[in-house]
Amino acid sequence: MDTRVKPAYDVRNNSVAFRMTWRATVLTLFPEMFPGPLGVSLAGKALASGLWALEARDIRDSATDRHRSVDDTPAGGGPGMVLRADVLADAIDAADIAPDRPRLLMSPRGRPLTQAKIVELAAGPGPLIVCGRFEGVDQRVIEARRLEEISVGDYVLSGGADRRLCPAAARRDGNARLGGRRELFRRATGIPAIYPSAGI
């Protein structure tokens, strides 16, 4: 189904007009999470009627090894793993988005998402949204693919997908992560981790 051009009824002129459909393209390791909460209520009705479109693409489809590996150690060193530069760059290129569409990376170190930014995005053709995972994304991809880092808040989550789009899911995930760390700390030390100085 072609979602690029849709007829729309214009109430003011009592006529049918053609307009571009606002489209979100999401790159994620978990495409099955979409549309998730975006498939219900008003957003879901608008999606079903074609007022906007959602394309969830699996980053792993761009992996080339037999294990479909997507993580690697940071190129500059440091703890943890990051999304591999080659795989993510290929996934962004495979999305084949128009040059006028914003390219967003959901990242805790990005600029906070504001109402003004939402209005700006809503007025355009729709963004490409890269959902991070692990410790983040290889910096080379951020620079080479001109990704704008956007943050939905100052908290740490497991990953990118549904938590970026559903505040209740974000809260649940954040609480689970923190609660799990506190329990591990308590078990290891016998001390309840209720003090900020405990670092958890």
Image: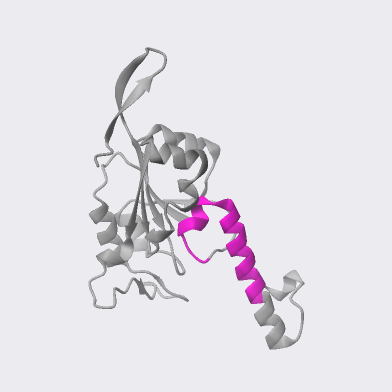
Above or below, 176 relative to 154: below
Q: Is residue 174 magenta?
A: yes
Above or below, 186 relative to 174: below
Which sits in the foreground, 17 or 111?
Answer: 17
Residue located at (33% from left, 35% from top):
21
Left/right placement of residue 192 relative to residue 10 reads: right
Q: Mainly helix, strand or loop, the magenta region?
A: helix
Q: In the image, residue 198 lies at what x, y percent? A: 72, 75
The reply to whether residue 176 is in sight is yes
Total numbered labels placed on residues in the image: 0
Colour treatment of the image: one colour
For the N terminus, the image quarter is: top left
Above or below, 110 relative to 82: above
Q: In the image, residue 107 lies at what x, y percent? A: 48, 57
The reply to whether residue 109 is in sight is no
Which sits in the foreground, 112 or 166?
Answer: 166
Left/right placement of residue 195 relative to residue 21 reads: right
For the C terminus, the image quarter is: bottom right
Above or below, 53 relative to 159: above
Residue 115's quadrant in the figure?
A: top right
Residue 11's quadrant in the figure?
A: top left
Q: In the image, residue 185 lies at what x, y percent? A: 68, 81
Residue 24's quadrant in the figure?
A: top left
Residue located at (34% from left, 25% from top):
8
Residue reaching furthest to the top: 13
User: In this picture, which residue range is highlighted in magenta?
Assistant: 158-181
Q: In the image, residue 61 lies at what x, y percent? A: 27, 64
Which sits in the foreground, 178 or 1?
Answer: 1
Residue located at (60% from left, 54% from top):
168
